[in-house]
């Protein structure tokens, strides 16, 4: 797999794929992103890859497990891995700032999704339309990432830089706005039809205003 799939290099299910299994994996990504997970059969995937259908089941017990092998590494990176270190450095330097924190995180996450465009499209489609997959994806986000995220939010609250909502509610607010932006521009609308830097700035400003405590 080429550089577009760096997120899989250390993933448990994909770090030791054989050449034939890599063809299956790539074909599943191509078909799931083009015509949807539900509309793609394992037979189509195997034909697209030029291998036997049985080759799929030697590594993945069914189509859903193949889907989760594609999406789980992305969920592991939805929240930045170095978030706690990032916030501590800013906190110690007395520069912990909601706008800078959110701008950095939002731009970083959007870049991650853009760089993995096909995988992101599969993720968004299944996250929205399949409740079972939605629940499995939420469950696959590392607990350590949530813990670090909560600690940073608590630090911001202590400095009166963040609205005193429940952290899960704040996460949902962030996720709904960021995912809404991605869906609008990468699922519905052609990417050449908007001023991306300007709209990312507007989305960030909207989120910052929504999460800033009222005086």
Image (cartoon, rainbow, N blue to C red):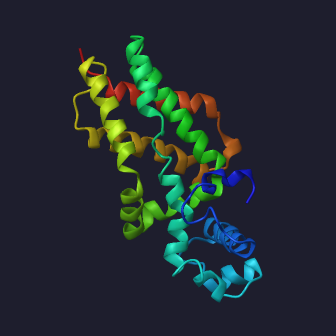
154 is higher (above) or lower (below) than 129: above
Residue 77 in the image, given as x and y percentages of width and height? 50, 47
Q: Nearer the viewer, residue 117 or 92?
A: 92
Q: In the image, is 215 to the left or to the right of 202?
A: left
Please say whether residue 128 is visible from this viewpoint. Answer: yes
Please say whether residue 41 is visible from this viewpoint. Answer: no
Q: Quadrant of the N terminus?
A: bottom right
| Number of marks in picture | 0
Residue 45 in the image, given as x and y percentages of width and height? 67, 79
Q: Nearer the viewer, residue 24 or 182?
A: 24
Q: In the image, is 45 to the left or to the right of 135?
A: right
Residue at 48% from the left image edge and 39% from the top image edge: 80
Q: In the image, is 53 to the left or to the right of 83?
A: right
138 is higher (above) or lower (below) than 101: below
Specify the quadrant of the image occupied by residue 108. top right
Residue 79 in the image, given as x and y percentages of width and height? 45, 42
139 is higher (above) or lower (below) than 92: below
Q: Nearer the viewer, residue 46 or 120?
A: 46
Residue pushed farthest top? 94
Residue at 57% from the left image edge and 64% from the top image edge: 70
Residue pushed farthest right? 50
Q: Nearer the viewer, residue 148 or 71?
A: 148
Q: Quadrant of the C terminus?
A: top left
Residue 131 in the image, given as x and y percentages of width and height? 37, 67
């Amino acid at each position: 797999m080429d550089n577009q799939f760096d997120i899989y290099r250390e993933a448990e299910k994909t770090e030791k794929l054989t050449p034939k299994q890599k063809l299956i994996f790539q074909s599943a990504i191509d078909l799931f992103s083009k015509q949807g997970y539900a509309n793609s059969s394992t037979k189509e995937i195997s034909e697209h890859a030029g291998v036997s259908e049985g080759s799929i089941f030697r590594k993945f017990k069914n189509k859903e497990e193949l889907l989760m092998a594609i999406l789980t590494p992305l969920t592991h990176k939805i929240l930045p891995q170095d978030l706690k270190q990032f916030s501590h450095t800013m906190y110690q330097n007395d520069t912990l700032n909601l706008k800078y924190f959110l701008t950095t995180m939002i731009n970083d996450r959007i870049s991650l999704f853009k760089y993995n465009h096909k995988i992101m499209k599969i993720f968004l489609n299944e996250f929205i339309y399949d409740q079972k997959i939605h629940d499995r994806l939420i469950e696959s986000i590392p607990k350590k990432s949530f813990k670090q995220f909560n600690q940073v939010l608590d630090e911001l609250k202590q400095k009166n830089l963040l609205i005193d909502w429940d952290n899960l509610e704040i996460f949902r607010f962030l996720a709904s706005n960021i995912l809404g932006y991605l869906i609008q521009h990468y699922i519905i609308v052609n990417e050449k039809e908007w001023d991306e830097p300007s709209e990312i700035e507007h989305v960030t400003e909207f989120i910052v205003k929504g999460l800033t405590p009222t005086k």
